[in-house]
Image (cartoon, rainbow, N blue to C red):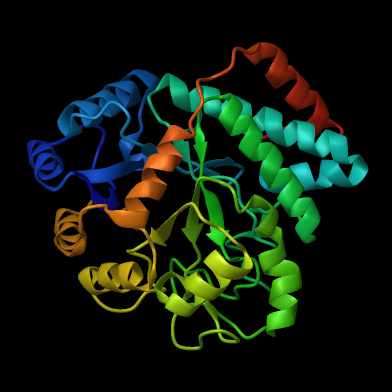
Amino acid sequence: MTKAFITGLAGTQLSSAERDFIRAERPWGFILFRRNIDTPAQVAALTNEIRDAIGEVEVPILVDQEGGRVQRFRPPNWPLYPAGAAFGQLYDIDPALGLRAAQLSAQLIADDLTKVGVTVDCLPLADVPVPGADDVIGDRAYGNEPKKVAAIARAVTEGLELGGILPILKHIPGHGRATADSHLALPVVNTPKNELESIDFAAFKPLANLPMAMTAHVVFSAYDAAHPATTSATMIEQVIRGLIGFQGLLMSDDVGMNALAGSIAERSKALLAAGCDMVLACSGEPEEMHQVARETPELSGKALARAKAALASRQAPKPFDRDAARAELDELIGRLGAPSA
């Protein structure tokens, strides 16, 4: 059996201590960051090492590869991709163009990832920014109108799936209104329920059937003034599972972010108690990883069923002409009068 957490790693290959930890604690999945990435051959070797250590060919290996500012795989060994806002700008010219560019970019990203053994991308975003919000989302977002955001997020999802990559919807129920970066501090949103439901949450509703989603470390005081969505049973039950209707695997955003209070162990317990299915622990720091592992149960019940369903939804990559796809993407982005990356 596996435990209900996803772990980061320290470097570009597994240490003997990490191998021992993986075999003893059996995390459900792994997430890669820049510190884990050098060359394609090295990443492929690392993902093979992970699968060998855990003894599971289908173990999910995640990365944040959006395009724009958030790309863990970067030149010189991987190409750059447009930020999400570019698809929104194209959509305003012609919706079909915006959706096509979003799908092409995601399928190209998926091709990069599958070649090195990564199977999950923390994408798409359905956050809807508002004026005055912190720039942590900024040009990562597809726009500021929920139907448009949802449509582009769906196109991104389709591109990932065509390339054999599982999507993770983020940051549910919405990070676009936050006035602080949750990596650094706890954002508090004091917007009334009706506005949240018609804008922020509305962008996520059409995407409620995605297999996985990642929470927002954001307080929505109209629902729960004391806890961010990640550790709020009210937000998870009433909003994420209820109003939005998301029924897939729900993981936290990184448990190490400063928006959350208490020790890593206390945070892990709190988010699982609130209704998250999975702890995401990104640091790769041994003591933090051991704290998470000690507080995380084996996957069981609804969480196990959701995890199995998510992995079962992954498709084999569809054949496509990569060079032609990249040329088409560059041509589409070129209509904005800016480079494609």
Which residue shows up at 32% across the image and 49% down it?
A: 304
Residue in view at x 54 percent, y 28 percent: 110
Residue 70 coordinates in the image, percent (x, y): 54, 46
Picture quarter containing residue 326?
A: top right
Specify the quadrant of the image occupied by residue 144: bottom right
In the image, residue 185 above or below residue 75: below
Residue depicted at x 75% and y 25% = 330
Of residue 278 and residue 156, the one placed in the foreground of this image is 278
Residue 149 at x, y percent in the picture: 74, 53
Q: Tell me, yes or no, if residue 279 can be seen here.
A: no
Quadrant where the C terminus sits is top right
- For this rendering, which residue is in front, 60 or 262? 60
Looking at the rendered image, the quarter that the N terminus falls into is top left
**298 with respect to 247 (left or right):** left
The front one of 115 and 165 is 165
Q: How many callouts does the rendering have?
A: 0
